[in-house]
Amino acid sequence: MDEIDRRILNALQVDASQTNAELAAAVHVSPPTCLRRVKHLRETGVIQRQVAIVAPEKVGPSLTALVEISLDIQAAERMAEFEALVAGEAAVLQCYRVAPGPDFVLVVQVADMPAYHALAHRVFTSHANVRNVKAYFSTFRSKFETRIAV
Protein backbone atom coordinates (compact mmCIF):
# COMPACT_ATOMS: atom_id res chain seq x y z
CA MET A 1 0.00 0.00 0.00
CA ASP A 2 1.43 3.34 -1.02
CA GLU A 3 0.51 6.98 -0.53
CA ILE A 4 -2.01 6.95 -3.39
CA ASP A 5 -3.87 4.01 -1.83
CA ARG A 6 -3.91 5.86 1.48
CA ARG A 7 -5.36 8.98 -0.16
CA ILE A 8 -8.02 6.85 -1.86
CA LEU A 9 -8.94 5.16 1.42
CA ASN A 10 -9.12 8.46 3.29
CA ALA A 11 -11.31 10.02 0.59
CA LEU A 12 -13.64 7.01 0.47
CA GLN A 13 -13.99 6.98 4.25
CA VAL A 14 -15.24 10.56 4.10
CA ASP A 15 -17.62 9.96 1.17
CA ALA A 16 -17.87 6.61 -0.58
CA SER A 17 -20.72 7.83 -2.80
CA GLN A 18 -18.50 9.98 -5.01
CA THR A 19 -17.99 8.94 -8.59
CA ASN A 20 -14.72 7.45 -9.77
CA ALA A 21 -13.97 10.69 -11.64
CA GLU A 22 -14.57 12.75 -8.48
CA LEU A 23 -12.44 10.40 -6.41
CA ALA A 24 -9.63 10.43 -8.99
CA ALA A 25 -9.61 14.23 -9.03
CA ALA A 26 -9.60 14.39 -5.23
CA VAL A 27 -6.58 12.08 -4.92
CA HIS A 28 -4.77 13.47 -7.99
CA VAL A 29 -4.66 10.37 -10.22
CA SER A 30 -6.27 9.47 -13.53
CA PRO A 31 -9.72 7.86 -13.44
CA PRO A 32 -8.45 4.51 -14.87
CA THR A 33 -5.68 4.39 -12.25
CA CYS A 34 -8.16 5.20 -9.50
CA LEU A 35 -10.62 2.55 -10.68
CA ARG A 36 -7.89 -0.09 -10.87
CA ARG A 37 -6.63 0.74 -7.38
CA VAL A 38 -10.09 0.73 -5.79
CA LYS A 39 -10.80 -2.61 -7.43
CA HIS A 40 -7.54 -4.00 -6.03
CA LEU A 41 -8.33 -2.64 -2.54
CA ARG A 42 -11.70 -4.42 -2.69
CA GLU A 43 -10.28 -7.69 -4.02
CA THR A 44 -7.61 -7.82 -1.31
CA GLY A 45 -10.14 -7.12 1.45
CA VAL A 46 -8.76 -3.73 2.47
CA ILE A 47 -12.15 -2.27 1.54
CA GLN A 48 -14.60 -4.69 3.11
CA ARG A 49 -17.83 -3.02 2.01
CA GLN A 50 -19.50 0.32 1.37
CA VAL A 51 -22.54 1.29 3.44
CA ALA A 52 -24.88 4.16 4.23
CA ILE A 53 -24.62 5.47 7.78
CA VAL A 54 -28.11 6.09 9.13
CA ALA A 55 -28.86 8.56 11.94
CA PRO A 56 -30.71 6.43 14.52
CA GLU A 57 -32.70 9.39 15.86
CA LYS A 58 -34.11 10.05 12.35
CA VAL A 59 -35.65 6.59 11.90
CA GLY A 60 -37.55 6.30 15.17
CA PRO A 61 -36.93 5.60 18.82
CA SER A 62 -33.59 4.06 19.55
CA LEU A 63 -31.54 3.04 22.53
CA THR A 64 -27.82 2.38 22.37
CA ALA A 65 -26.28 0.12 24.98
CA LEU A 66 -22.67 -0.83 25.62
CA VAL A 67 -22.80 -4.27 27.17
CA GLU A 68 -20.02 -6.09 29.01
CA ILE A 69 -20.28 -9.89 28.97
CA SER A 70 -18.25 -12.26 31.13
CA LEU A 71 -18.39 -15.98 30.44
CA ASP A 72 -18.04 -18.79 32.96
CA ILE A 73 -15.78 -20.82 30.68
CA GLN A 74 -13.33 -18.99 28.41
CA ALA A 75 -12.23 -21.95 26.29
CA ALA A 76 -11.76 -21.05 22.62
CA GLU A 77 -14.76 -23.07 21.48
CA ARG A 78 -17.02 -21.43 24.10
CA MET A 79 -15.85 -17.96 23.07
CA ALA A 80 -16.53 -18.80 19.41
CA GLU A 81 -19.95 -20.19 20.38
CA PHE A 82 -20.88 -16.90 22.03
CA GLU A 83 -19.60 -14.89 19.06
CA ALA A 84 -21.74 -17.00 16.72
CA LEU A 85 -24.74 -16.41 18.96
CA VAL A 86 -24.43 -12.62 18.88
CA ALA A 87 -23.49 -12.57 15.18
CA GLY A 88 -27.03 -13.73 14.46
CA GLU A 89 -28.59 -10.82 16.34
CA ALA A 90 -29.37 -7.75 14.21
CA ALA A 91 -29.43 -5.55 17.34
CA VAL A 92 -25.78 -6.34 18.08
CA LEU A 93 -23.87 -3.88 15.90
CA GLN A 94 -20.38 -4.69 17.15
CA CYS A 95 -18.77 -7.40 19.26
CA TYR A 96 -15.24 -7.18 20.66
CA ARG A 97 -13.21 -9.69 22.64
CA VAL A 98 -11.45 -7.63 25.30
CA ALA A 99 -8.89 -8.02 28.03
CA PRO A 100 -8.54 -7.50 30.91
CA GLY A 101 -11.98 -7.38 32.49
CA PRO A 102 -15.02 -8.81 30.78
CA ASP A 103 -14.64 -11.24 27.91
CA PHE A 104 -16.72 -9.22 25.43
CA VAL A 105 -17.99 -5.71 24.91
CA LEU A 106 -20.99 -5.32 22.62
CA VAL A 107 -22.50 -2.27 21.00
CA VAL A 108 -26.24 -2.81 20.83
CA GLN A 109 -28.92 -0.70 19.12
CA VAL A 110 -32.56 -1.43 19.98
CA ALA A 111 -35.84 0.49 19.76
CA ASP A 112 -36.40 0.90 23.48
CA MET A 113 -35.91 -0.65 26.92
CA PRO A 114 -38.46 -3.46 26.39
CA ALA A 115 -36.57 -4.42 23.22
CA TYR A 116 -33.32 -4.45 25.21
CA HIS A 117 -34.87 -6.66 27.87
CA ALA A 118 -36.09 -9.10 25.20
CA LEU A 119 -32.59 -9.22 23.68
CA ALA A 120 -30.96 -9.64 27.10
CA HIS A 121 -33.26 -12.51 27.98
CA ARG A 122 -32.92 -14.23 24.59
CA VAL A 123 -29.14 -13.89 24.27
CA PHE A 124 -27.57 -13.19 27.64
CA THR A 125 -29.61 -14.62 30.49
CA SER A 126 -30.74 -17.79 28.72
CA HIS A 127 -27.22 -18.62 27.53
CA ALA A 128 -25.77 -21.11 30.01
CA ASN A 129 -22.17 -19.89 29.73
CA VAL A 130 -22.87 -16.19 30.48
CA ARG A 131 -21.75 -15.41 34.03
CA ASN A 132 -22.20 -11.63 34.17
CA VAL A 133 -23.87 -8.89 32.11
CA LYS A 134 -23.31 -5.20 32.72
CA ALA A 135 -25.03 -2.67 30.47
CA TYR A 136 -24.45 1.04 30.02
CA PHE A 137 -27.15 3.02 28.24
CA SER A 138 -26.25 6.01 26.13
CA THR A 139 -27.91 9.28 27.09
CA PHE A 140 -26.15 11.35 24.41
CA ARG A 141 -23.77 10.59 21.55
CA SER A 142 -21.18 13.34 21.33
CA LYS A 143 -19.04 11.65 18.67
CA PHE A 144 -19.51 8.88 16.16
CA GLU A 145 -16.85 8.15 13.58
CA THR A 146 -16.25 5.26 11.24
CA ARG A 147 -12.94 6.41 9.73
CA ILE A 148 -9.69 4.72 10.68
CA ALA A 149 -6.29 6.30 10.24
CA VAL A 150 -4.47 4.98 7.19
Image (spheres, rainbow, N blue to C red):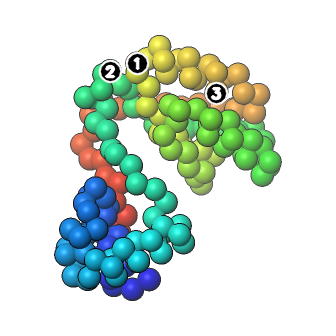
Question: Relative to residue 32, is residue 15 depicted above or below?
Answer: above
Q: In the rendering, which numbered label is found on residue 124?
A: 3
| x and y, in percent, of residue 61 in the image | 32, 21
Judge left or right: residue 17 versus residue 47: left
Residue most extreme to the top: 114
Identity, as a three-letter code, of the amino acid under mark 1:
Asp
Q: Earlier in the sequence, mark 1 or mark 3?
A: 1
- Name the amino acid, label 3: Phe
- Choose between 27 and 20: the one closer to the eye: 20
Q: Quadrant of residue 128?
A: top right
Dot label at residue 61: 2
- SS at mark 3? helix
Sequence-wise, the earlier of marks 1 and 2 is 2
Rendered residue at 26%/82% (across/down): 30
- Residue 11 image-quadrant placement: bottom left
Is 144 drawn above or below residue 134 in the view shown? below
Q: Earlier in the sequence, mark 2 or mark 3?
A: 2
